[in-house]
Image: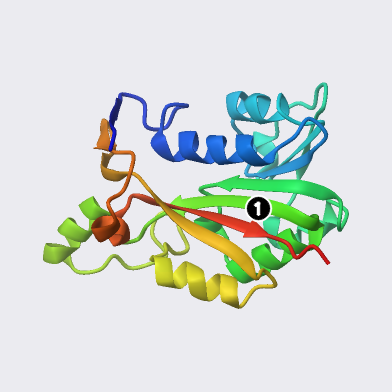
Amino acid sequence: MMCMLSLSPGGERSLDWLHLRESFRRHVSPNSTVVEIGASNQARSDELAAMCREYIGIEYFSERLLPSAGNKSFRNGDWQKLTDVVPANSVDLVIASHVIEHVPDDLRALEETYNVLKPGGIALINTPNRRRLPRAIIETWTGPRKFPWWEHVREYVEADLADLIRRSPFHDYAIYPVALGLHASVVACLASVPKAMRGYANFWEIHLKRDSG
């Protein structure tokens, strides 16, 4: 079990992004067409685009749109209406980091993800755990956080995600816990989450696969 320390939790060394990036690396190929939801980080977009044939970045806020260049194109769009800007059955891989907790209709977002994926295509999504260890400790005294909170429409425990996915078109899925501990101005946490502490992980990473037939 490895302990990692970072002084830049919002940067490229954040454990949730590192884990998601490695999952992406395992599924992507040089011939892949990739869609990133919430594409406003130039360094991350460049990194993803370097591993695929075509990269399409979808950003809800037009003022955050990055310039298209090379194999990268950026489009103003809403995850809940993804087929308005991305053709159905055209994408090998969809990735979204810390976006689904902001989306009013998360089920619709998953339905649209399914629609744009090719048969057998993969979606990789991460999101905060509502009962992450620091939050669970705080709520012992304060009571559960009420949502919406800041920009988050909701946050999820594992059962919430399982229920959401079961209501979606996806049948093949896995939910992974990512990191355990302090992930704030300084990151000091376990990269591998012990089974007994799974429910207190900092983040969830969801892998979804569209049916092949």
Q: Which residue of the protein is positioned furthest toward the left in this rendering?
A: 141
- Give the x, y percent position of residue 162: 50, 71
Vertical arrangement, residue 42 with respect to residue 137, above or below: above
Q: Quadrant of residue 210?
A: bottom right
Q: Identify the residue at horizontal 70%, vertical 34% (top origin).
A: 65
At horizontal 33% and vertical 49% (from top left) the residue drawn is: 202
Identify which residue, 108 or 210, lies in the foreground: 210
Left or right of residue 181, residue 58 in this image? right
- The quarter of the image holding the C terminus is bottom right
Front residue of 44/210: it is: 210
Q: Residue at x 42, y 72 (%)?
A: 159
Q: Using the rendered view, name the quadrant where residue 135 is placed.
A: bottom left
Mark 1 crowdedness (10 Å alpha carbons): few <14, some 14-19, many ≥20: many
Residue named by callout 1: 123
Q: How many marks?
A: 1
Quarter of the picture containing the N terminus is top left
Q: How far from the left and from the top, in percent, is residue 148? A: 42, 64
**Depth order, front residue of 157/80:** 157
**Relative to 92, 90 lies left or right:** right
Please determine whether, in this image, residue 206 is positioned above or below residue 69: below
Callout 1: SS: strand
Is residue 4 visible to us here? yes
Q: Position of residue 141 (x, y in %)?
A: 11, 64
